[in-house]
Image (cartoon, rainbow, N blue to C red):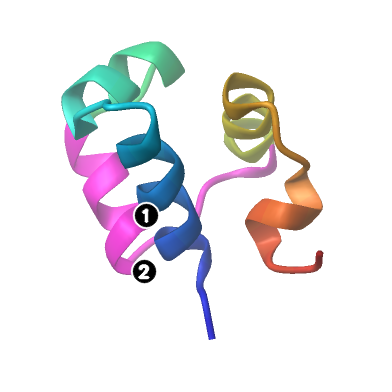
Amino acid sequence: METFGDRLKELRTERGLGQIQLAKELGVGKSVISLWETGKSEPTLGNLVKIALFFGVSTDYLAGLS
């Protein structure tokens, strides 16, 4: 089953972005991206919306609901 972290990493790599670049775009630390991608942490609702808007996907997709 694909997790939020898997989806985030896939979207990030499809865009050719490193963790540091994505962190800057979202206004979070690089370590936060790593924690999200490894499933050790989950984004706040506000950050989930930022991620969805940045990548042009739905929050449902990111959450694994669609």
Tag 2, which secondary structure?
A: loop
- Identity of the residue furthest to the bottom in this view: 1
Position in image of residue 41 (x %, y %): 39, 61
Of 27 and 14, which appears nearest the observer?
Answer: 14
Occupied quadrant, residue 19: top left
Tell me the residue that label 2 is attached to.
39
Of 20 and 47, which appears nearest the observer?
Answer: 20
User: Disc 1 marks which amino acid?
Assistant: Trp
Q: CA distance from mark 1 to mark 2?
A: 5 Å
For image coordinates 24% across by 28% down, the residue present is 29
Tag 1, which secondary structure?
A: helix
For residue 36, the mark is 1
Occupied quadrant, residue 38: bottom left
For image coordinates 78% across by 41% down, the residue present is 58
Position in image of residue 54 (x %, y %): 58, 21
**Residue 18 relative to residue 66: left or right:** left
Position in image of residue 12 (x %, y %): 37, 37
Segment tinted magenta in the rendering: 30-45
Position in image of residue 18 (x %, y %): 19, 29
For image coordinates 68% across by 27% down, the residue present is 56
Judge whether 5 appears above or below 24 on screen.
below
Classify 10 Å Cα crowding around label 2: few (below 14), some (14-19), many (20 and above). Answer: few
Of 9 and 48, which appears nearest the observer?
Answer: 9
User: Disc 2 marks which amino acid?
Assistant: Gly
Judge whether 62 appears above or below 2 on screen.
above
Q: Indicate yes or no whether the magenta region holds residue 2.
A: no
Classify 10 Å Cα crowding around label 1: few (below 14), some (14-19), many (20 and above). Answer: some
Q: Indicate yes or no whether the magenta region holds residue 35.
A: yes
For residue 48, the mark is none
**Labels 1 and 2 touching (C-beta < 8 A):** yes
**Residue 54 relative to residue 14: left or right:** right
Judge whether 14 appears above or below 59 on screen.
above
